[in-house]
Image (spheres, helix red, strand yellow):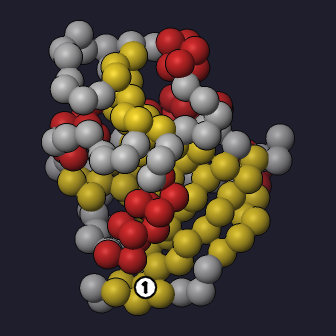
Amino acid sequence: MKIIAAVDEDGGIGKNGKLLFNISKDMAYFKKITTGKTVVMGRKTYESIGKPLPARRNIVLTRDSKNYQGVETVSSVEELLRICDNDAFVIGGGEVYKLLMPYCDTAYITRIFKRTDADVFMPELSDTDGWRVVEKSEVYHENDVNFQFFTYKRTL
């Protein structure tokens, strides 16, 4: 599996069930990379989006027995691994990133060079944890923030 996320300088990814930033270039990047693929998310992330993402297979990992229209639900990592291919993207939230990170080999991270008062965080990808940067874009500027796209690969 793969990870895709936009994080602030402290690893923040959200606040009050919403994304921290609205950056059209990042949204286009997310769409380009995930269209035609499987996206895996937690219940809170799905509810914050409010509907299945189009042109993607949507899987919600949840302990809730609620049936969500237009998505598949699984209640365990084992069940997810049985039905999911290696090309799936974990798209959030914080608990799902932590839970599925050991099963991921690539991470597409948009680093936003600003601090926020986020209440949801993604674990840091560091060399000591077996992750290394293999590609990075130029620095972009939009909506009063600078940001950069990074691709990480697991080395361990």
Name the quadrant of the C terminus: top right
**Observer able to see residue 95:** no
* Horizontal side of residue 22 vs 29, given as left or right: left
Query: From what the image shows, is residue 92 above or below residue 20?
Result: above
Structural crowding at the residue carrying mark 1, measured as other residues with C-alpha within 10 Å and reported as few (<14), some (14–19) or many (≥20): few
Q: What element carries label 1?
A: strand
* Residue drawn at 39 percent across, 69 percent down: 28
Q: Quick check: 70 left or right of 27?
A: left
The residue closer to the viewer here, 96 or 121, is 96
Question: Is residue 128 shown above or below 145?
Answer: above
Q: Mark 1 sits on what residue? A: 146
Q: Does residue 47 appear in the picture of this structure? A: yes
Q: Where is residue 99 in the image (x, y as percent from the top left)?
A: 51, 29
User: Residue 103 appears at what percent x and percent y?
Assistant: 64, 31
Q: Name the residue rendered at 70%, 43% in the picture.
A: 105
Horizontal and vertical percent position of residue 151: 65, 63
Q: Which residue corresponds to the image point at 61% horizontal and 40% vertical from the top-left?
A: 87
| Amino acid tagged 1 | Asn
Depicted 73 relative to depicted 31: above or below: above
